[in-house]
Structures are given as C-alpha cells and as structure tokens.
Amino acid sequence: MSLTARFVLILLIGESAAYFVFLIVKRRFEGRWQWRVDLQTIKGWLERVFLFLCLVYGLPHALIAFGALKIGTRVSDKENRVSNDYFFIGNILSLLLAVSYYAVWLIR
C-alpha cells in the first residue's frame, strides 16, 4: 500500500471514531445529540490533519505552533465564549487523536 493511501486510510478511520467521541463530548457540554458539520467541525478536522502531517514528516515543534494558534484565536474570540473545560477537553482530544493516528502510522 502506498504511503499516501495508508495516510488517508488511517485518517478516515480515525476521523470516523472522532465523530462519535466528539458527539459524546458535545452531549456532555451542550446537552444535545445533534451533530452537524459546522465551522468548528471543519477546524477540528484541519487541526488533526495538520498535526498528523507534521508528526509524519518529523516536525514535532509544530505542536508549539498549534498551541500558540489555539491560544491566540481563543483570546480574540469575544462573541463565541465556550467554557474552559469544553475548550480544554476538545483540544486535548484533538491532540490525542492526532498522536494516535501517528502511533498507528508507526506500526509497520
């Protein structure tokens, strides 16, 4: 299997699992099971793809850039305030998923 196909396969399987994980988190913090693809969903997907790519290409310092971007966007967002717990749990889960994808990637 080509490396690109393997990358996409790991990402698709992981994001399918992420769908249900974040559905449970949304239920806990927002009190609803409704799931829709919105801007937050797309941003989360892009974050995990970015982190996974950086880990695959040996750029672990991208985690620092990721953290800085997350904090910077969090500080400037005055209209859409979410609880700190929700923000923290969502980001930790996103990082954990990306690192998990990488761990699967390392299995030969």
Image: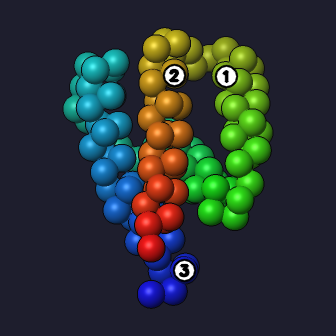
In the picture, the quarter occupied by the C terminus is bottom left
**45 is higher (above) or lower (below) than 22:** below
Residue type highlighted by circle 1: Arg
Q: Between residues 82 and 50, which one lies in front from this camera angle?
A: 50
Q: Residue at x 44, y 66 (%)?
A: 107
Residue 27 appears left or right of 73 = left
Q: Secondary structure at mark 1?
A: helix
In the picture, the quarter occupied by the N terminus is bottom left
Q: Which mark is residue 87?
A: 2
Residue 95 x %, y %: 53, 39
Q: Going from the N terminus, do you reach mark 1 or mark 3 first?
A: 3
Residue 70 appears left or right of 43 = right
Residue at the disc numbered 3: 3
Q: Residue at x 26, y 32 (%)?
A: 24
**62 is higher (above) or lower (below) than 76:** below
CA neighbours of label 1 inside 10 A, class few (<14), some (14 to 19), many (20+): some
